[in-house]
Image (cartoon, rainbow, N blue to C red):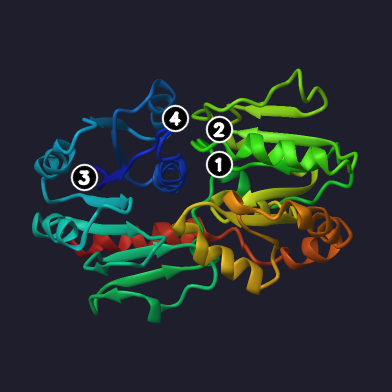
């Protein structure tokens, strides 16, 4: 008997960002030894195809226009486990997939719709069941116990005492509004004599002028292992309330947090209310006059945050995720 097929459906691009794409690949990495994996995505770039092929068994390219919606449904045979990760997958679309006979898993940020899925995953802390509209049978996998991180961030490590970089700025894999460049410019104006590094993704199309900022190191096209290594070499970070913030917690890297899209607000509020990061609020409207003092507060309290992060992520989420998916096999 062959492996059960899991079809992961998410998109990523310089326009919409790479967050959904990256975390569904993290999920795929957890499942790859036990399931046959297909990754369905709209107009994948050569980079995305290579990343998918590294983990999954096949790529199912979809068109950019709206025909992708029905084309994906027609592709389903009814025996698959389908994973959806995007905001435009409505309750009605979920029902159509369930009507095919498929098991359905939805990855959630916004909890802004009714779920008929078998499982909903939201790996941000501070989320609870009362926030969801769902069917009685829908199982919720919430918080860091079910975190979707790439393998290098789910390995035990000891924080390094040797830090080559004071502050790592990482706004996102795509950063279509190029918040990165503005942030770097404003931080350098603070004249704090920081050793500064910038992490950008493969889809980043902005520009950090190396002639203007010769002392700023820019890191691009790093794989997960290299990002984990980079974080290990930094004293602190500046990140949005997204997967990179959870990666920082896993690496025990203290950070300043903000947001620039609505789906990051709830996790941001949770991070700040739990004092797991220093607040910067909306990245597009930062009060740069207060940035200097906020950054100083973080740098003066690094050991406190390193200690706080110690047991927040127990590295066992892959086991919990795999167990949940295997239950679908028993039900077939």
Q: Dividing the picture into quarters, in which one does residue 184 lie?
A: top right
Q: Secondary structure at mark 3?
A: loop
Question: Is tag 4's residue or tag 1's residue first in the polypeptide sequence?
Answer: 4
The residue at the far top in this view is 211
Are the residues flagged by discs 3 and 4 in contact, CB closer than 8 Å? no
Q: Dividing the picture into quarters, in which one does residue 210 lie?
A: top right
Q: Quadrant of the C terminus?
A: bottom left
Label 1 Cα crowd, 10 Å radius (few <14 / some 14-19 / many 20+): many
Residue identified by numbered label 2: 201
Are the residues flagged by discs 3 and 1 in contact, CB closer than 8 Å? no
Give coordinates of residue 216: x percent, y percent: 78, 29
Q: Nearer the viewer, mark 3 or mark 1?
A: 1
| Viewer-side residue, 17 vs 286 | 286
Q: Secondary structure at mark 1?
A: loop
Residue identified by numbered label 4: 51
Q: What's the CA distance linking mark 3 and mark 1?
A: 41 Å
Q: What's the CA distance linking mark 4 and mark 2?
A: 13 Å
Are the residues flagged by discs 1 and 2 in contact, CB closer than 8 Å? yes
275 displayed left or right of 29: right
């Amino acid at each position: 008997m062959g492996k059960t097929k899991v079809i992961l459906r998410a998109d990523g691009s310089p326009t919409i960002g790479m967050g959904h794409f990256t975390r569904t690949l993290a999920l795929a990495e957890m499942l790859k030894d036990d399931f046959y994996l297909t990754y369905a995505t709209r107009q994948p770039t050569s980079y995305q195809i290579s990343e998918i092929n590294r983990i999954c068994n096949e790529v199912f390219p979809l068109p950019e226009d709206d025909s992708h919606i029905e084309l994906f449904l027609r592709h389903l045979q009814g025996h698959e486990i389908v994973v959806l990760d995007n905001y435009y997958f409505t309750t009605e679309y979920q029902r159509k997939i369930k009507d095919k006979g498929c098991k359905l898993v939805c990855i959630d940020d916004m909890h802004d719709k009714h779920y008929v899925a078998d499982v909903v995953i939201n790996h941000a802390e501070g989320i609870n069941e009362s926030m969801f509209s769902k069917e009685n049978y829908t199982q919720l996998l919430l918080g860091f116990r079910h975190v979707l991180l790439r393998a290098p961030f789910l390995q035990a490590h000891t924080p390094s005492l040797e830090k080559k970089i004071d502050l790592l700025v990482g706004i996102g894999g795509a950063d279509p509004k190029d918040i990165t460049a503005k942030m770097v410019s404003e931080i350098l104006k603070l004249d704090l004599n920081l050793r500064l590094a910038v992490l950008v993704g493969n889809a980043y199309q902005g520009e950090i002028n190396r002639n203007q900022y010769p002392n700023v190191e820019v890191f691009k096209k790093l794989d997960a292992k290299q990002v984990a290594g980079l974080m290990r070499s930094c004293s602190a970070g500046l990140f949005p309330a997204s997967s990179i913030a959870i990666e920082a917690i896993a690496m025990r890297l203290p950070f300043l947090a903000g947001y620039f899209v609505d789906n990051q607000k709830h996790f941001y509020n949770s991070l700040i209310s739990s004092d797991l990061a220093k607040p910067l609020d909306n990245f597009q409207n930062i009060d740069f006059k207060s940035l200097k003092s906020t950054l100083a507060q973080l740098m003066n309290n690094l050991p406190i945050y390193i200690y706080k992060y110690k047991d927040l992520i127990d590295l066992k989420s892959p086991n919990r995720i795999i167990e949940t998916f295997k239950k679908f096999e028993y039900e077939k």
